[in-house]
């Protein structure tokens, strides 16, 4: 079955692909929303949702059609493309989903991949409280000193290390990628990269906790723009954020 279905003519060749992982506080999805809206990206394709929790809804700004669990956004004159994932992978389909996603990336012609996700703020060491953002460079990824991700080297973003033991059961779980509390499929995606992976890849993680995470998303989107040297003159929130993003306000008459 075909995993990717283009809805308009668009090429990802040479572009940096931003991949948000469903994780704690959905900070990556919110950051992707900000990037899509602020860069005026439009939907260029949808992905097979077989391995994801079913979801459907209205599109942003009353555009025709429906929103699906996994979509691709881009624009010909912008050097990034953004995947937006709106529901998690089904429990027994996680690896199938990861395999399909990585195969799409491998054959897409993208120049680099930036994976973004959240990590549980309550699981931090004292040293990790000094910065909200950290990074993981998977072993074997091509050198980052030149190319679209080179600016990351100049940013004060420390390498992520797990605050808890990652070998809880047996040696089969040992991996070069540290355990990421609340990180969703971030670790699985990075651990599934083959030894022949040729696309520069980095994972940016942000310490967050559940709540009103709009400010966290703004910070993550800003870090992504600096890492990719994208000019965003005016950050814009999607119009849908104004319609109960974190629930509708309580009726104040309840409190007298």
Image: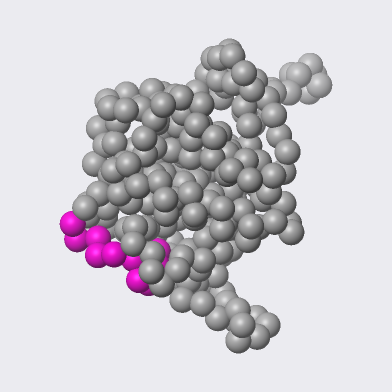
Q: How many marks?
A: 0
Question: Which one is nearer the viewer's eye here, 34 or 130?
Answer: 34
Residue 186 visible to an observer of this rendering: yes
Residue displayed at 78% across by 23% down: 255
The answer to whether 248 appears left or right of 146 in the picture is right
Which residue extends farthest left? 146
Front-most of residues 8 and 73: 8
Residue 135 found in image quarter = bottom left
Q: Position of residue 251 (x, y in %)?
A: 76, 19
Q: Residue at x 56, y 14 (%)?
A: 63
Look at the image and give the residue range highlighted in magenta: 136-146
Q: Quadrant of the C terminus?
A: top right
The rendered magenta stretch, by its main secondary structure, is classed as loop
Is residue 156 shown above or below 70? below
**Percent x, y of residue 190:** 48, 63
Which residue is at 58% across, 48% downward? 22
Name the residue nearer the viewer: 186 or 107. 107
- Quadrant of the drawing holding the N terminus: top right
**Left or right: 58 with respect to 213?**
right
Q: Which residue is rendered at x = 50% and y = 68% of the image?
A: 191
Residue 114 visible at all? no
Tell me residue 204's x, y (percent): 41, 54
Check the image and report above or below for 24 versus 65.
Answer: below
Please check the rendered image and state whether residue 245 is part of the magenta-colored stretch, yes or no: no
């Amino acid at each position: 079955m075909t995993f990717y279905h283009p809805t308009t003519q668009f090429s990802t060749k040479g572009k940096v692909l931003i991949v948000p992982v469903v994780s704690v506080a959905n900070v990556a999805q919110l950051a992707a929303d900000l990037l899509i809206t602020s860069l005026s990206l439009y939907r260029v394709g949808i992905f097979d949702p077989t391995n994801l929790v079913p979801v459907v809804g209205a599109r942003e700004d009353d555009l025709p059609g429906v929103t699906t669990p996994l979509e691709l956004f881009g624009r010909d004159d912008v050097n990034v493309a953004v995947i937006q994932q709106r529901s998690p992978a089904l429990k027994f389909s996680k690896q199938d989903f990861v395999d399909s996603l990585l195969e799409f990336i491998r054959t897409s012609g993208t120049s680099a991949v930036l994976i973004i996700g959240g990590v549980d703020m309550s699981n931090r060491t004292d040293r990790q409280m000094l910065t909200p953002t950290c990074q993981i460079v998977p072993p074997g990824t091509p050198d980052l000193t030149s190319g679209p991700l080179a600016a990351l080297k100049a940013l004060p973003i420390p390498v992520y290390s797990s605050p808890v033991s990652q070998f809880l059961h047996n040696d089969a779980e040992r991996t070069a990628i540290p355990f990421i509390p609340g990180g969703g499929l971030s670790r699985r995606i990075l651990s599934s990269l083959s030894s022949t992976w040729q696309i520069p890849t980095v994972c940016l993680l942000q310490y967050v906790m559940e709540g009103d995470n709009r400010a966290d998303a703004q910070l993550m989107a800003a870090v992504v723009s600096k890492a990719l040297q994208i000019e965003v003159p005016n950050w814009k929130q999607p119009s849908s954020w104004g319609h109960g993003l974190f629930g509708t306000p309580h009726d104040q008459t309840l409190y007298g």
